[in-house]
Image: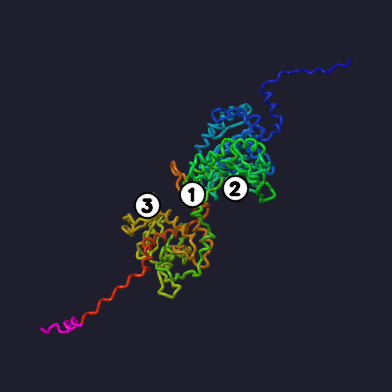
């Protein structure tokens, strides 16, 4: 009789079991599958505590799973606020900790926010999910660096350049990038610094997400530069065709007699294909049957993939809520920018003050450089002093603040500028040559040098600087208060730069033939045009409120000629440019004195006849 082999059984200790489990390959799961199987939401951080369910936000599935696409290196998510972008990052972090331990970094706008999210979002997620909790090394962890089996998770604020440049990482997550600070004189911008940390990993992954702010903001530029851009399409419940949710198809009554609340409550969505009425009750099923589709492809290779989605897709926001927010914000630029950014996921552009280099070049006249137009009545100049050179501009002014740049350039020193300002400029009509009447020179850099120069050229030059506080006037005349300077007691001009930038941008849109147009000479160069339109006006957070402020479109761009034009405009105001039109008004003729009577002439002739 054949005997079966005897198998001796030994008890397996806990450490042996863990050692054997560590040798097992990870489960074959996508990020979204992992989230649905292992992610637990706690009541402290979620309105729907319990297991994660992809069906609640099905549009996040494609975004999360893109992390595992071997062809994709960079994922960009441009989204409205509160659409689940942070939750997608948390799910990706959980997947990495359990399935693919690798050095990982998440960059937030500030250290304070990073610490808050670590304490209130990431650690609670880890502790609520058993599969993550057993890998968490709590004793070795710090607030901004969490330790796990086989990896660390570093949380960094974009305002800490030294922390961004200190670690090699494979997975990089950049959250709310449009709130990051710009580059400084000593450091590159935080996104560039963080990217450098991934260079040693060939299989690196970079995830960028944010609500957009302006067209030159980080996330919008990243989206435009993607190889592939995808939008979420959903089936119409009436015709079955795949459509995109867009503002243009949200319909509400046009009865102006109704309150905006009542109009908003009656809002519905009209299918752009069949015109069928779509209500909030249809949205859940539409989202579950939706899919990401390519709307733009810049390259056949999908190395950088972008996703764009707006508030219409949120399962927690009604069509009426969107319409109500629109009505509340439409007459307030500050609130309306928030609606465009945080609800429509689109960049804000103030079209009234939008300028670009092409607009400047359209303002070229037939008058060549260094020639004064026939209508000009005075010349002013502005100078911006930099560390390595000096920028200058000369502008001719006429009635109704009509103006034209007749010359601009760079000089090595103020001595070279002195030569330019003392030249005589020929008139187009052959009249008497003109000289610069007044020049304002920025005294922000190398103040003593500028003060001394202006004191030596006081007949045409005044020191100036942009006002640091709020001003109601365009400019204010003060005095140099520096006893050690030769310019002590000399007039100095404080300039409200914001008001003059408003004026310049607004007048750029006037046609050359219009009164008050802002023009440039024939053959004007593009560098000048780029610099004079290097800023735009956007909402910037100041304390507890947003303030419309002029900021540079690109942190690396130059705006020196714009500063020069601001000072030239302030100089023109000092010379009463706004009153020049009075010279054109015809004075009423003076009636001739009546001819004296004959007897009066006889008396004058014979005054001594008595």
Dots 1, 2 in contact, CB < 8 A: no
* Mark 3 crowdedness (10 Å alpha carbons): few <14, some 14-19, many ≥20: few
In this rendered view, identify the residue nearer to me: 435 or 601: 601
466 over 14 or under it: above or below: below
Name which quarter of the figure residue 242 lies in.
top right
**Mark 2, residue position:** 222
Mark 1 and mark 3: Cα distance apart in space = 20 Å
Name which quarter of the figure residue 40 lies in.
top right
The residue under the point 53% across, 40% down is 264
In this rendered view, identify the residue nearer to me: 573 or 320: 320
Indicate yes or no whether the magenta region holds residue 410: no
Q: Quadrant of the C terminus?
A: bottom left
Residue 472, disc: 3
Indicate yes or no whether the magenta region holds residue 599: yes
Residue 538, disc: 1
Bounds of the magenta span? 598-610
């Amino acid at each position: 009789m054949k005997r079966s082999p005897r198998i001796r059984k030994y008890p397996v200790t806990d450490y042996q079991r863990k050692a054997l489990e560590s040798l097992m390959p990870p489960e074959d799961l996508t990020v979204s599958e992992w989230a649905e199987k292992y992610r637990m939401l706690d009541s402290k951080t979620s309105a729907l505590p319990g297991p994660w369910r992809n069906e609640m936000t099905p549009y996040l599935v494609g975004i999360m799973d893109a992390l595992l696409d071997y062809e994709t290196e960079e994922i960009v998510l441009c989204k409205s606020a509160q659409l689940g972008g942070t939750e997608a990052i948390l799910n990706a972090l959980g997947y990495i900790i359990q399935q693919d331990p690798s050095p990982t970094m998440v960059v937030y706008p500030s250290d304070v926010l990073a610490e808050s999210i670590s304490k209130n979002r990431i650690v609670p997620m880890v502790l609520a999910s058993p599969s993550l909790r057993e890998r968490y090394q709590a004793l070795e962890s710090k607030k901004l660096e969490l330790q796990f089996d086989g990896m660390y998770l570093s949380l960094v604020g974009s305002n800490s350049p030294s922390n961004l440049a200190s670690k090699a990482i494979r997975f990089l997550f950049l959250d709310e990038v449009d709130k990051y600070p710009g580059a400084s004189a000593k450091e590159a911008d935080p996104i560039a610094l963080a990217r450098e940390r991934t260079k040693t990993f060939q299989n690196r992954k970079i995830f960028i997400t944010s609500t957009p702010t302006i067209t030159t903001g980080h996330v919008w530029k990243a989206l435009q530069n993607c190889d592939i851009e995808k939008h979420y399409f959903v089936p119409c419940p009436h015709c079955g065709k795949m459509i995109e949710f867009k503002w243009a198809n949200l319909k509400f009554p046009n009865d102006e007699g109704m309150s905006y609340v009542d109009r908003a409550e009656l809002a519905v969505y009209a299918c752009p294909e069949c015109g069928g009425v779509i209500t909030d009750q249809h949205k859940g099923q539409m989202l579950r049957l939706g899919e990401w589709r390519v709307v733009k492809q810049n390259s056949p290779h999908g190395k950088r993939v972008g996703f764009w989605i707006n508030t219409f897709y949120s399962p927690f926001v009604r069509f009426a809520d969107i319409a109500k927010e629109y009505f509340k914000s439409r007459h307030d630029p500050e609130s309306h920018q928030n609606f465009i950014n945080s609800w429509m996921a689109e960049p804000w552009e103030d079209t009234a003050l939008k300028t670009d280099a092409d607009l400047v070049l359209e303002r070229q006249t037939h008058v060549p450089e260094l020639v004064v137009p026939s209508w000009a009545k005075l010349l002013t100049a502005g100078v911006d002093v930099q560390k390595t050179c000096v920028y200058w501009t000369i502008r001719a002014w006429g009635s109704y603040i009509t103006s034209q740049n007749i010359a601009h350039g760079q000089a090595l020193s103020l001595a070279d500028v002195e030569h330019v300002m003392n030249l005589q400029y020929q008139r187009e009509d052959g009249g008497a040559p003109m000289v610069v009447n007044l020049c304002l020179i920025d005294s922000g850099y190398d103040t003593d040098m500028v003060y001394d120069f202006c004191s030596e050229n006081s007949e045409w030059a005044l020191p100036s600087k942009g006002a640091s506080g709020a001003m109601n006037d365009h400019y204010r005349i003060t005095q140099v208060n520096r006893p050690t300077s030769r310019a002590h007691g000399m007039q100095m001009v404080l300039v409200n730069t914001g008001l003059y930038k408003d004026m310049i941008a607004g007048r750029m849109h006037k046609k050359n033939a219009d009164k008050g147009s802002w023009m440039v000479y024939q053959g004007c160069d593009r560098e000048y045009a780029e610099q004079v339109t290097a800023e735009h006006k956007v909402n910037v957070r100041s304390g507890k409120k947003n303030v419309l402020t002029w900021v540079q479109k690109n942190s690396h761009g130059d705006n020196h000629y714009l500063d020069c034009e601001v000072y030239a405009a302030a100089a023109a105001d000092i010379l009463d440019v706004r009153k020049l039109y009075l010279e054109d008004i015809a004075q009423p003729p003076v009636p001739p004195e009546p001819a004296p009577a004959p007897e009066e002439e006889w008396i004058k002739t014979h005054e001594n006849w008595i």
